[in-house]
Amino acid sequence: MKNKSYETVKYKYGALQSFYWMLYCVGYSYVTLYLTGSGFSAAEIGMITALFGAMAALLQPLVGKLADRGGKYGWKPQMCGMVLLSLMFLTFMTLWRAKLAQGILFGCFLLLISCMMPMINAANFYYENRKIPMQFGIARGCGSLFYAVLSLILGKLTADGDISKVVYAGLMVSAALLFILFIMPYGKNMDNEDAGCAGTIKNDIPQKSDGLAKGNDNLSFYSRYKSFVWMLVGFVLFLMFHNITNTYLLQMIEYVGGNSENLGMALAISAVLELPVMFGFVWLRKRFSMTTLLTVCSMAFVAKSICFMLAENVWMIYLTQIFQTFSFALFASSSVFYADEVMDAQDKVQGQSLVTMTMTLGSVLGNLLGGFWFDMFGMKAMLTMSVGLAVAGAVIVFVVTKDKLHFVSEIPQE
C-alpha cells in the first residue's frame, strides 16, 4: 500500500497490543487477589475461571470462523463489541457488590479478554496481507512492557487491601483500548485496494485442491492439520502449568512470606524479561524454524516449573521468573506465526482462534485442577503436580517436532 495514512498503522497496532495486555493484566493477573478479597476460596476461584474459560474455549473458534468472513463480522467490529461489553461488566462490578454477582461479572470479563486475543493476532495479518509493513514482535513487546508497568502500579495500589482499584484500572484501560480501535483503519477502502477477507488475502496463498480447502467441515479441518492438533495438545498441558503458577502466584508468594506488592514485582519482572524475545523475534524468525522455537520454549516451561517447586523465599520466585524469557515470551510470538504458516488462507483466523483456545483450555483445566489440588493437598503438592504437566506437554511437543527441528527457518524470507 502506498497510502501515507497507513504508515502509522504499526504504531497504532503497538498501542493496541499494549492496552490489550494491560487489560489482560487487570483480569488474569489480579483475578485471585480480587476474588479472594471478595470472599472466594482458591477452589471457588478455580471453578469460576474454569467455567468462564470453558465458555471462552467454545466461543473462540466460532468468533474466529466468523471473523474470516470479514466486513461487519471481522476482527475490528468484534473487538469493539467485546470492549464495550467489558466496560459494561466492569461498571456493574462497581455497583453490584454481592459475592455471587462479583464472581459472575468478573468471570464474564475474563471470557471477553480471552475472546479478544485471536482478534488481536488476526489484526496483524489483516494489515500484513494488505502490504502494510508490520512489526509483530515489537508490538507484542510493547504489550509486555506496559503489562509490567501496570503490574507494578496495581501491586502497590492494592497493597492496602483495596481491591476496587482493580476494577477502576480495568475501566480506564478498556476506554483507552476502545479509542485505539476507533482510529485503526478497517473496511471497504482497504479491501478495495487489496482484495481480501478479514485476516487474509486469498490470492496470495496457494489453495488446497480436491475439495480439501473447505474450512466449514470440522472433520476435514482436523484431518488436514493432524500435527497441528497434536501440537495444540502439548500447548494445553504446559499452559496448564503456566496458568496454575500465574493464577495462584499470590498464594505461592504468601507461602514464602510475601504480599500483593511482591506479586506486582514478580509479574513485572516476568513481563520485562519477555522484551528481548519480543523485540528480537524478527531475527529469531529468520534464524530458527517455528517448530524449533516451540521446542525451546517447552523446555523452558519445564525448567521454570522445577524452580518454582524448589523456591523457598520471594527472591527465589523472582529469580525463577527469568525463565519467562524462553517460556511464555517465546511461545506468545512463535505460536502465532506457527499457526499462520500451517493454515490455508481460508483457515487462518480459525487457526489463531485454536491457538488462543489452547491458552483458554490451559487456564480452565489448570485453574480448576490447581485450586482443588491446593485446597486438598497444599502448595508443595500443587507445584509438584504442575511439574508433571509441564513435562508431559514438553514431551508431546518434542515428539511432534523431532523430525522438523532446523536452525534455519523453512519459511522463505523476503
Image (spheres, grey):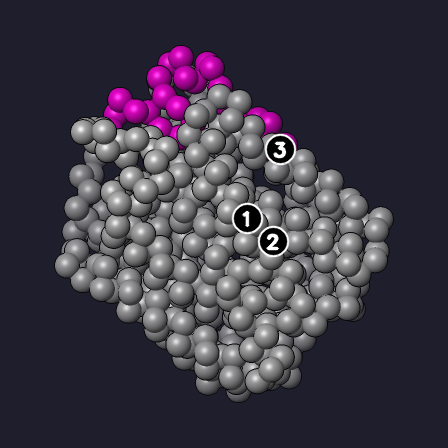
Give the magenta-colored segment's residue range: 179-205
The quadrant of the rendering that contains the C terminus is top left
Question: Where residue 384 is drawn, which disc sits there?
Answer: none
Q: Position of residue 158 (x, y in %)?
A: 73, 64
Q: Amino acid at mark 1?
A: Ala
Q: In terms of secondary structure, where does tag 2 sit?
A: helix
Number of numbered discs overlaid on the protein picture = 3
227 left or right of 198 in image: left
| Circle 1/circle 2 CB separation < 8 Å | yes
Q: Is residue 93 above or below residue 365?
A: above
Query: Quick check: is 275 in the magenta stretch?
Result: no
Q: Position of residue 195 (x, y in %)?
A: 35, 17
Residue 90 seen anywhere in this rendered image of the structure:
yes
Q: Which residue is mark 1?
A: 56
Name the mark nearer the viewer: 3 or 1: 1
Question: Where residue 81 is drawn, which disc sits there?
Answer: 3
Query: Quick check: is 184 in the magenta stretch?
Result: yes
Q: Which residue is mark 2?
A: 52
Q: For mark 3, does the 10 Å Cα neighbourhood hold few (<14), some (14 to 19), or many (20 or more) residues? A: few
Q: Position of residue 92 (x, y in %)?
A: 79, 46
Q: Amino acid at mark 2?
A: Phe
